[in-house]
C-alpha cells in the first residue's frame, strides 16, 4: 500500500503515521529524497505499512557535517508543526547512509528522543575523531553496517571496541548498488533489533 505524504519540499519528505514512533532517514551527501532506485521510498513505505510509523526523509545536500544539527532540528520542527505535537514525545529511530550516518553519530546526543541509529557505510575516515567523541555522549543504541570494500572498513574496526555494534557485509563497496540494493533496504530492519 502506498503511504501518504503530508509534506514535501526539495530537501524533506514526511510520510503520515499513526503511532508514537518516527523513523528519520538521512541520505548521503548529494542524495535525493528518493534514493538510487527509489530505496528511501521503499524503506519509508515499509516502516509506515509495517509499524504505522511516521517517516521523515531528509536529503543531505551539503558535504558538511556542521549542518547536521540544523537538518535534524528542521525536520523535527516541521513534524511538530504539521502534527500539532512534540517530537520529544516519540521514539525516534534513525537510519543514515554515508554523511547522513555521520551526522546522526555526531548530533544524536542533543536529541534525547533518538533511541536507535543504524548507519550504512558512514564516512569514518574523514570525521572519525569527532564521531568517537560524540557517540559516547548519546544514549541511543548504535549499529553500523560497513562493506568490506568501503574506505571506512579499517576505521570501523576501531569502533567495534566501543559501544557501537559493527556489522560487516563482505564484498560491498560504498554505495550498495546492483545486487546489494536489497541488502541496503534490509539494513533499515536492524532498527527493530533489540
Image: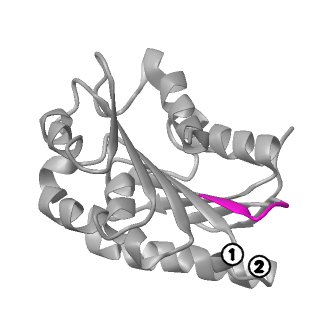
- Seen at 20% across and 67% down, the residue is 133
Counting from the top left corner in percent of width and height, residue 184 is at 48, 31
Looking at the picture, how far across and down is residue 147, in whole percent? 29, 27
Report the coloring of the rendering.
one colour
Q: Residue 107 or 1: which is nearer the viewer?
A: 107
Residue, disc 1? 79
Q: Is residue 96 above or below residue 138?
A: above
Q: Are marks 2 and 1 in contact (CB under 8 Å)?
A: yes
**Where is the C terminus found, in terms of image quarters?**
top right
Label 1, secondary structure: give it. helix
Asked if residue 175 lies left or right of residue 81, the reply is: left
Can residue 11 be seen by looking at this rendering? no
Name the image quarter holding the N terminus.
top right
Classify 10 Å Cα crowding around label 2: few (below 14), some (14-19), many (20 and above).
few
The image's mark for residue 82 is: 2
* Circle 2: element type: helix
At 68% from the left and 75% from the top, the residue drawn is 79
Q: Which residues are magenta?
A: 18-23
Q: Name the side, left or right, on which 138 lies relative to 189.
A: left
Q: Nearer the viewer, residue 8 or 126?
A: 126
Residue at 80%, 84% (x, y): give it: 84
Q: Quadrant of residue 151?
A: top left
Residue depicted at 67% across the width and 61% down the height: 22
Amino acid at each position: 500500500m502506498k503511504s501518504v505524504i503530508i509534506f514535501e519540499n526539495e530537501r524533506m519528505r514526511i510520510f503520515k503515521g499513526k503511532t508514537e514512533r518516527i523513523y528519520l532517514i538521512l541520505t548521503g551527501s548529494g542524495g535525493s529524497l528518493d534514493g538510487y532506485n527509489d530505496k528511501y521510498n521503499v524503506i519509508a513505505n515499509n516502516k509506515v505499512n509495517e509499524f504505522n510509523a511516521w517517516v521523515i526523509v531528509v536529503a543531505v545536500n551539503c558535504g558538511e557535517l556542521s549542518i547536521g544539527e540544523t537538518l535534524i532540528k528542521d525536520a523535527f520542527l516541521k513534524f511538530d508543526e504539521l502534527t500539532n505535537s512534540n517530537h520529544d514525545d516519540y521514539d525516534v529511530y534513525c537510519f543514515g547512509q554515508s554523511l547522513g550516518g555521520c551526522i546522526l553519530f555526531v548530533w544524536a546526543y542533543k536529541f534525547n528522543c533518538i533511541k536507535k541509529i543504524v548507519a550504512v557505510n558512514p564516512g569514518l575516515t574523514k570525521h572519525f575523531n569527532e564521531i568517537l567523541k560524540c557517540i559516547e555522549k548519546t544514549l541511543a543504541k548504535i549499529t553500523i553496517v560497513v562493506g568490506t570494500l568501503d574506505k571506512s572498513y579499517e576505521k570501523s574496526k576501531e569502533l567495534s571496541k566501543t559501544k557501537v555494534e559493527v556489522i560487516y557485509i563482505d564484498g560491498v563497496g560504498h554505495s550498495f548498488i546492483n545486487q546489494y540494493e536489497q541488502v541496503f533496504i534490509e539494513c533499515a530492519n536492524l532498527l527493530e533489533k533489540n
